[in-house]
Amino acid sequence: MTESYQPTAFSNGYEFTQGTGYQLPEYPFVEPPEIRSGQPGHHPIVIVGGGITGLTLACSLARHGVAAVLLDEDNTVGVKGASSRGICYTQKSLEIFHRLGIYERIAAKGIQWSVGRTFAGDDEVYSFDLKEQAAYNLSTQPPFINIQQFYIEGYLVERIQELGHVQLRWNNRITAFAQDADGATLSVTTPAGDYQLRADHVIDATGSRTPFRQWVGASVTAKKGDDRWCIADVRFTKRPPTERHTWIEAPFNENRAVWQHLMGDDVWRIDYQMAPNADPDEVSREEVVRERLARQFGPDTGVDIVWVGPYAYRSECVDQMRHGRVFLMGDSAKVVSPFGARGGNTGIADADNLAWKLAAVVRGQASPAVLDSYHQERHEASTENVLVTNRTARFLRPVTPAEHLFRRAAIGLAKQHLFARQFVNTGRMAVANTYTRSSLCHATGGRSTQNAAFTWADGSTGVVNDLLQWAGGQLLLLVFGRLSRQDLQHLKALASAAPVRCVQVLGDGEHAQAREHVRDQNPRGTGHLRNACHVYGQTWALVRPDAYVAATGDHLDGSLVQAVARTLGAAATMENA
Amino acid sequence: MMKTTLQVQDADTFYEQLLDAHEGLDADASALLNARLILLLANQVGNAAVLRECIAAAKDTPR
């Protein structure tokens, strides 16, 4: 590690925000029944924190019909007084939101983008079009949508209210926490008084300033940095192009980096890299921000400043994402730089990962051992995301003379030669992380599917999420190609013995043998379902409710039975016994 | 595996070309040239294990 890094002056930014701000929804405070009764209420699942991560988990549980309580310290979404946080949502997140039933609203409000251009000085270093990349092709969701985070949070709140099952308790702030063999106790303060809750499972989604790390004694692995940025969310009278633009060295920003992104409501996010010793108060002053914008867009451009927020990022990850009854997720578990949109999107993935496991355990369909896989899977993802974002941060904020030197070499070569573009690291966009160390996944599994389209037996078009919905929180077994009579008997026996729903996937010219069948064909092509499940010649794919493949296999035999048992935590139980 | 026997076809000519390329450059320009060269050559090597071994070997060589 480089010793010349300065200690981080971490800031969430909202202390210094300026601009006219956004209009945020406000939700009513309702006096919790525990205050009147004087008795601590008992709830199987308590979620602390109503940000994008906590709300995604709450909505996912609600969709599974599982009861939970969510505590949020204020009465709105977004960050107090500011509200503009994440902006860029990946295909995987959009697929999750599709499953939760809010994707259409996000697509209608947000901005789809796929073209990105990277500049150094006055030269374009390279550009890309994500639509041309095969990795994004199978899904019915686009590679990315840009939208202000609070919109998604607001949609989640309304969806939860529609679905029921989860109580959203606004203006409920947690003040103390303890856990023992019988449960966890949470002390909560509200405008109407204080009360206590007992819970079996507690989810810490309070974010980067979480008190839980201290309460549960979580150790943290961190890397120091001194990079500082200042966001300006603005509306233009003269519109720049609808593309992601990135300057590594912007002539109009003292040769420091600048990001330019369009979000909903015609609001542009312009993110300026500042000098490492910049004073957050000074760089976010309105006159200073206007001067900076004028340098970039010309003095004649009319600009309406919506929000300004300076920030410094941390890079840290807890070493254990589960501490007894407590599950840390989102920024509570790890904080990364914003490059590559690996913060919010991975919080959403944390939530989606735990939701189905909690639901299966609460319903008695899986062993409590599946809950251990939350740490195994999401800590691997967190570690990967910390590594990837640290590398980008190091490229964008070179510290030593050697780091500066190689960056100059890489940028110079990238303008001439294709290969060198890969060294120019302005952020590696978040992906659905692969799980290689999970006790739930076989070596053939651990990879995310995509929300690919197929044809239902009645001729209408469906997507993977529809199949998951049909499976209703049980495992989904896709069986490809022809089945023998014996195969059909095996499948019938399996479906009656375990929470598994089976469907036969028919290829070209194949006839249906199982009552539940779909055809792997859609208006854009054939074999999308097979490819989305990473099936290239195998017979079956076992898909979890979070759209991850747990295992694939060649024969409908004991290996499949084992895979089902492993995915429901049985194998892990045996290992622990 | 990193090769430690000679692979360069004409070692003397390559060495001379290297020195000639640095002729008349100040320390900064020389360093930049070397950095570009490392990235170009790394792409010719390609193999991750070999690159890792080469970095380790360069680091471990006594002054």
Image: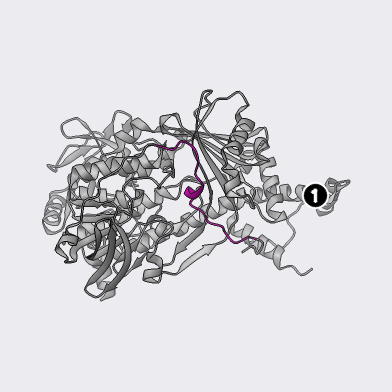
Say which of B32 and A522 sits in front: B32
Task: Assess whether residue A10 is covered by the magenta stretch.
Answer: yes
Instruction: Please indicate whether residue A104 sits to the left or right of residue A222 in the image.
Output: left
The relative height of residue A521 versus residue A343 in the rendered view (above or below) is: above
Task: Give the residues drawn in magenta, as a range.
Answer: A5-22
Residue A64 locus on image (x, y percent): 20, 50
Amino acid type for the residue under numbered disc 1: Asp
Residue B50 locus on image (x, y percent): 62, 59
Residue A525 locus on image (x, y percent): 32, 31
Question: Residue at 35% of width from left, 38% of height from top?
Answer: A139
Instruction: Please indicate whether residue A173 sits to the left or right of residue B39 in the image.
Output: left
Dominant secondary structure (helix, strand or loop) of the stretch shown in magenta: loop
Question: Residue at 36% of width from left, 37% of height from top?
Answer: A138
Say which of A348 and A116 sits in front: A348
Callout 1: chain = B
- Image quadrant holding the C terminus of chain A, namely bottom left
- Image quadrant holding the N terminus of chain A, namely bottom right
